[in-house]
Amino acid sequence: MITPWFPLCVGAALACWPAAPTRLQAVVEQPTTVHLPDVWAVLRWLLPAAVAGLLAGAGGAIAAAVLTLAWRQEHQAHRRVTADLETAAHTATALRTMVSELRSGAHPVTAAEAAAEVVPAVSGDLRALATSARLDGELRASALPELAAAWTLGKRHGLPMADVLDASRRDAEASLTFARRTRAKLAGPRASAAVLTGLPALCILLGQAMGASPVPVLTESAPGQLLLVVGSILLWAGTAWCRALTGRVQIR
């Protein structure tokens, strides 16, 4: 039996099929390298919706897609916070190393190269800063904006480089300590939000175990399908709201 999903997918694929380039485009436009997407990276996000669609209908597919989106956003937010903390720690370590080298009489370029050896994670940015300073160019570092700004300030106004970088180091270490302390204090509220997010699924399982049969109602009736969609959207909104509340404190 052919379901309506098959002709719908075939029609969408034909609508998105790329048109052949014209003769003028083939002459004028330069050939570009096509990077194929990771198939598994796409399928692992579409697989829950596909399985839910087979088991619980269209409402289940939409609900699974919304919940998968919520979980992905939470995962990305966690990775982003972890990356920010690691970057702040690398910045503080690089500044500490450079201040120590400058206090011992080293040149700022030599201090930056020594810091690149100590902090391999940001060695590329440190060596780029050292090269720019050696060539008297503009100091830029996407991973170390505080260091680049402090170095530029000291160089422009003729300030003692060790004192300027030491002040930046104290600010970076204070921000890092505050961010770690705040993240530890928010671990409890985040855990409570995760438990509250999983309670609807637990209630459905308990109702099914008690004989109330909520699963057939949600999967075999139109009101149940609508409730699945509305409930998943409310869960996603709740996770987004909790993430917005707990993510207001950022490393500056």
Image: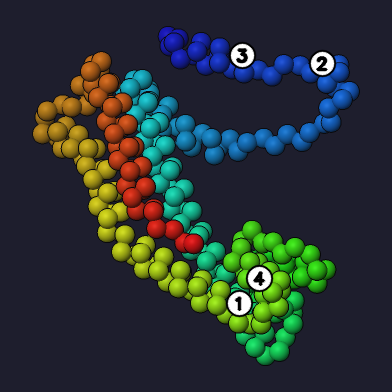
Please state the horizontal and vertical placement of residue 216, each as a whole percent of the image.
21, 22
Residue located beneath label 4 in the image:
153
**Residue type beneath disc 1:** Leu
Q: Which residue is labeled 2 in the image?
A: 22
Few, some or many residues within 10 Å of mark 3 (<14, 14–19, 20+) = few
Residue at image point 38% right, 32% down: 66
Q: Which residue is mark 3?
A: 14
Query: Are the residues tagged 1 and 4 within 8 Å (C-beta)?
Result: no
Q: Are marks 2 and 1 in contact (CB under 8 Å)?
A: no
The reply to whether callout 4 and callout 3 are in contact (CB within 8 Å) is: no
Kindly give the residue lying farthest to the right in the view shown. Answer: 27
Marks 1, 4: nearer the viewer: 4
Mark with earlier residue (2, 3): 3
Whether residue 114 is visible, yes or no, is: no
Q: Residue type at mark 4?
A: Leu
Q: Is residue 23 above or below residue 162?
A: above
Q: State the colouring used for the structure image.
A: rainbow
Q: Secondary structure at mark 2?
A: loop
Instruction: Decide which of 63, 114 is in the foreground and name it.
Output: 114
